[in-house]
Image (tube, grey):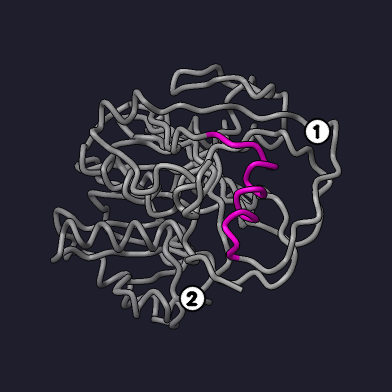
Amino acid sequence: MGTIPTASFAAATTRIGVPLCRLQISNLTFFPSKLSTSLSNALLKHLSPTMSANSLQVNGSSAIDVPSEKLEASSRGNIGANDLLIVGPGVLGRLVAEKWREEHPGCQIYGQTVTTDHHDELIKMGINPSSKQTKLTYKFPYVIFCAPPSQTEDYAGDIREAALNWNGEGSFLFTSSSAPYDCFDNGAINEDGPIVPIGRSPRTDVLLKAEKVVLDFDDRGAHIYWLHKGSCDIRPDHILNLIHYEDAASLSVTILKKRLRGRIFLGCDNHPVSRQEVMDLVEKSGKFDKKFEGFTGTSDPLGKKLNNSKTRAELGWEPKYPSFAQFLGVSE
């Protein structure tokens, strides 16, 4: 029936910290441009550890095979004061590139990827691609790391390598997840909420160890959620915190421009909703012709209600899309 723009809402906890800043993004809800079958709830698709507010490190992906010697040469002595390296230029990274170029029209943007599968797409977007195997011989003033941990066996090591490509002048930003916040009863959490202890969960351990690397420099991360088809074996009353991809990108750019150090920020729309409420709003919008079949889970963990009023007040930032309901054009 209808379509929703590809870059849509994301579950939204974003933490940021300085000298390296970290941005924690709880959930990014991604709607495919078309949904032809029954919908399911937002499921966590990928996580990235904490992100530092000041500096941003990004791994870009590119689709054309460019000789590594040329990539090394191009990055050797021509890096400008506003040039940006994106480690993991996926949906969020590409939106950051677009918004960064609007702020700095003459800048160069580089993208580091695990494979060369999408290098041609990056080149068309004006992003200079390189693969993870290509050694970058020049440091960048701005770096954002938004690659997921699912594509590597040494996530913390990858973040350490990315941080070494930052020259310390602008900002290094690491996008991570809100998973490390120690709250699983749908309770309230803000930027200063308690963190899950190391050793309790393999999933959060990956994020916390990666975050420590950034904090040793300093940073925190993000997850992305997709809507799937059919029914879901998860509980409907689990609370999600959402943020639109465009808003996550604009928040990242705002933080990068501030050149902060050792700070933590949260990214969310301040309108937490349950999984069931998400699907009710989707159905109410009338944008899809298939009905969600329902949730069947009863015992999995609950979520948390995030609030980033402190982040907004300090940065002077507000989201373009105040809530998921407003994005869909329906009343809550």
Residue in view at x 75 percent, y 57 percent: 292
Q: In the image, which disc is placed on residue 157?
A: none
**Residue 253 lies within the magenta run:** no
Q: Element under label 1?
A: loop
> Quick one: label 1, few (<14), some, or many (20+) residues within 10 Å?
few
Q: Is residue 269 visible?
A: yes
Q: Indicate whether 95 appears above or below 201.
A: below
**How far across and down, in percent of the image, does residue 207 sit?**
58, 36
- Which numbered disc, 1 or 2, marks the residue that appears first in the sequence? 2
**Closer to the camera, 26 or 329?**
329
**Closer to the camera, 183 or 123?**
183
Residue 124 quadrant: bottom left
Q: Is residue 6 left or right of residue 19?
A: right
Residue in view at x 60 percent, y 27 percent: 304
Q: Element under label 2?
A: loop
Q: CA distance from mark 1 to mark 2?
A: 37 Å
The amino acid marked with disc number 2 is: His
**How far across and down, in percent of the image, does residue 300 sit?**
80, 33
Q: Which-is-in-front pick, marks 1 and 2?
A: 1
Q: Indicate whether 288 appears above or below 281.
A: below
- Residue linked to disc 2: 118
Q: Is residue 232 left or right of residue 4?
A: right
- Residue linked to disc 1: 300
The amino acid marked with disc number 1 is: Asp
**Closer to the camera, 330 or 293?**
330
Magenta residues span 272-287
Residue in view at x 27 percent, y 58 percent: 99
**Residue 284 lies within the magenta run:** yes
Residue 239 quadrant: top right
> Quick one: label 2, few (<14), some, or many (20+) residues within 10 Å?
some
